[in-house]
Image (spheres, helix red, strand yellow):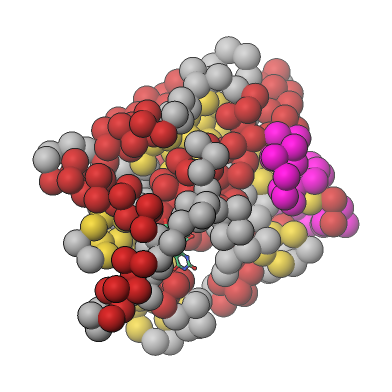
Amino acid sequence: MKSRPVLALAGGVGGAKLALGLSRILSPQQLTIVVNTGDDETFHGLHVSPDLDTVMYTLSGLANPETGWGLAGDAFAANSMLKRYGVPAWFNLGDKDIGTHLRRTELLNAGWTLSQVTAELCFRLGVRHPVVPMSDGRVATMVNTDQGSLPFQDYFVRLRCEPVAHDIEFRGTPPPSPAFVEALEGAGAIIYCPSNPFLSIAPILSLPGVRERIASFRGPRIAVSPIVGGQALRGPAAKLMGELGFDVSCAGVASWYRGICDTLVMDRADEGKKDAVAAFGLRPEVAGTVMVTDDDKTALARCVLELADEGAGT
Ligand code: FO1
C-alpha cells in the first residue's frame, strides 16, 4: 500500500501482534490502528481500556511478553491491598498499569475524549502510529450465557469463559470516533487483525454505519484467521464459535466474514481448508500466522500487505 493508508482493525493480544508487524513496515502516515473498546470497564473508579492498552504497550515495547496484556515486570501490590480490604479485585491491575488508568480517568473527567486521551498516552509512550479507539462513546460487550447476561470482563476473566454462551450483544450505539471515520474514508485497504471476530471485531462493526461502509468498500479487505487447526491461538474464540453454532475452523471464520472481506489468510496447518473457505466467497491464502517472535509479526504483516497491493491492482 504505497499510496493510500491501511486501516487495521484490532482487538487485544493477537491484534496487537499484527499491528506491531504492520507498524514496522508502514510509516505513521500509512497506517491507522482502530481498536475495540467493547471490553472497557470501570474498576475501582478507573476507566480501563484493555485492548487499547494492549496495542499501546505492544507498540511501545512495554507489554508483558508472557500474558500479552499488562506491562512487563509489573507488580500487583495495589491489587493485593484491595483484596485485603475485601474488594473483589479479580481483574488483576498491575501497579504501573494503574498509572495508565489513573491518567486516562483523570483526563476523561477533565472533559477529554477517549481519542484525545489515547493520543496523549501514546505520545508519552513514544507510539507514533495512530492508535484510535473505535468510538469515543460507550459500547458494552455483553455475553448472554446459561449464567445470565454477563459484562465481557466478568465472562472472560472472573468466570474464565466457563459459561455457555448463546448470544453476544453490544449495548450502546455511539458514532465511530472521528479518526476512525476519517480512516474509513481514506483507506486503501482494510486489514482485520487475527482478533476474535465475535468479541473484538464485531463490536467495531456494530457502530452505526461501519459495517455498511466496509461492505461497500472498493479496496482490498483482508482478514487473518485467529483459528489455526480448529483451535484458537489464545482465548475463547474456538469455544465461543462452537457454542454460537459456527464450524470451529478457518472456514467458520470465513463464513463469519462473508460480504465484508475478500481474502482470508489462514495458517499452513489449514491448507486443506482452502476450498471450504473459497465456498464462502473469500480468496484463501496460506501463510505462517502463528506469531511468536517479532520477525514472525513482520513476516505476516509483509505477506498481508503484499496481498493488499495485489488486491489494489485488480
Ligand atoms: N486478562 C486476564 O485473563 N486476567 C486478568 O486479570 C486481566 C487483567 C488485565 C488488566 C489490564 C488489562 O489491560 C488487561 C487485562 N487482562 C486480563 C486482559 C483482558 O481481559 C483481555 O485480554 C481483553 O479484554 C480481551 O482482549
Q: Farthest residue toward the left?
A: 110
Q: Ligand 1: give its quadrant.
A: bottom left
Q: Farthest residue toward the bottom?
A: 147
In reply to whether residue 280 is colored magenta, the answer given is yes
Q: What x and y, as percent, mark residue 194?
A: 62, 49
Note whether residue 239 is visible. yes
Note whether residue 205 is visible. no
Number of numbered callouts drawn: 0
Q: What x and y, as percent, mark residue 215?
A: 50, 39
Quick check: 101 left or right of 131? left
Residue range corresponding to the magenta coloring? 270-299
Looking at the image, residue 31 lies above or below residue 17: above
Q: What x and y, as percent, mark residue 131?
A: 43, 35
Looking at the image, residue 209 lies above or below residue 66: above
* Residue located 44% across and 29% down the image: 126
Looking at the image, residue 4 lies above or below residue 214: above
The answer to which quarter of the image holds residue 145 is bottom left
* Residue located 80% across and 46% down the image: 288
Quick check: 190 left or right of 252? left
* Residue located 68% across and 28% down the image: 305
Q: Farthest residue toward the top?
A: 3
Task: Identify which residue, 70 or 216, lies in the foreground.
Answer: 70
Task: Identify which residue, 112 or 273, lies in the foreground.
Answer: 112
Q: What x and y, as percent, mark residue 33?
A: 48, 35
In reply to whether residue 45 is colored magenta, the answer given is no
Task: Identify which residue, 106 or 224, lies in the foreground.
Answer: 106
- The C terminus is located in which quarter? top right
* Residue located 38% across and 53% down the image: 97
- The N terminus is located in which quarter? top right
